[in-house]
Image (spheres, grey):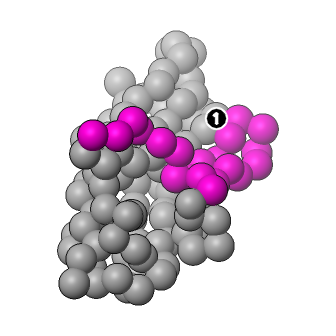
Amino acid sequence: QVQLVESGGGLVQPGGSLRLSCAASGSIFSINAMGWYRQAPGKQRELVAAFTSFGSTNYGDSVKGRFTISRDNAKNTVYLQMNSLKPEDTAVYYCNAQGATMQLYEYDYWGQGTQVTVSS
């Protein structure tokens, strides 16, 4: 079993910044991909930023140049630095991790989500 714990969401004014964190714990043998997705009311879940299994990073088009994903492998943690926030960034942000457990079972887990609201 793998658990993902997200933190850092909240209310921020347009143009402001927030930093999200997602820590993975449990029976982790490997983390092959990890990143952030978001879902706004009435919309589909979309990619925000993620480290891929090939070691590269992907960003959603709407956040390129404003958001930066980083990671601390020793802590099994990824971060999302969000700058120049816009009202359209308002959504529930979900962490996702894919890899293998200590029992060598593949996993694909989602966190519980953290609300980000950008409003004046």
**In the image, what residue occupies the spot 76% across and 49% down?**
56
**In the image, what residue occupies the spot 48% across and 79% down?**
83
Is residue 70 visible in the rendered structure shown here?
no
**In the image, what residue occupies the spot 47% across and 81% down?**
84
| Residue 38 location (% of width, % of height) | 39, 48
| Residue 55 location (% of width, % of height) | 76, 45
| Residue 78 location (% of width, % of height) | 50, 57
**Based on the displayed image, in which of its 4 quarters is residue 30 positioned?**
top right
| Residue 76 location (% of width, % of height) | 50, 50
Q: Is residue 106 left or right of residue 37?
A: right
Query: Which residue is labeled 1 in the image?
Result: 32
How many marks the image carries: the answer is 1
* Amino acid of disc 1: Asn
| Mark 1 crowdedness (10 Å alpha carbons): few <14, some 14-19, many ≥20 | some
Is residue 31 visible in the rendered structure shown here?
yes
Q: Is residue 57 magenta?
A: yes
Viewport quadrant of the C terminus: bottom left
Q: Is residue 11 left or right of residue 5?
A: left
Q: Is residue 114 left or right of residue 1?
A: left
Which residues lie in the magenta part? 42-61
Viewport quadrant of the N terminus: top left
Circle 1: element type? strand
> Observer-nearest residue: 70 or 67?
67
**Based on the displayed image, in which of its 4 quarters is residue 31 positioned?**
top right
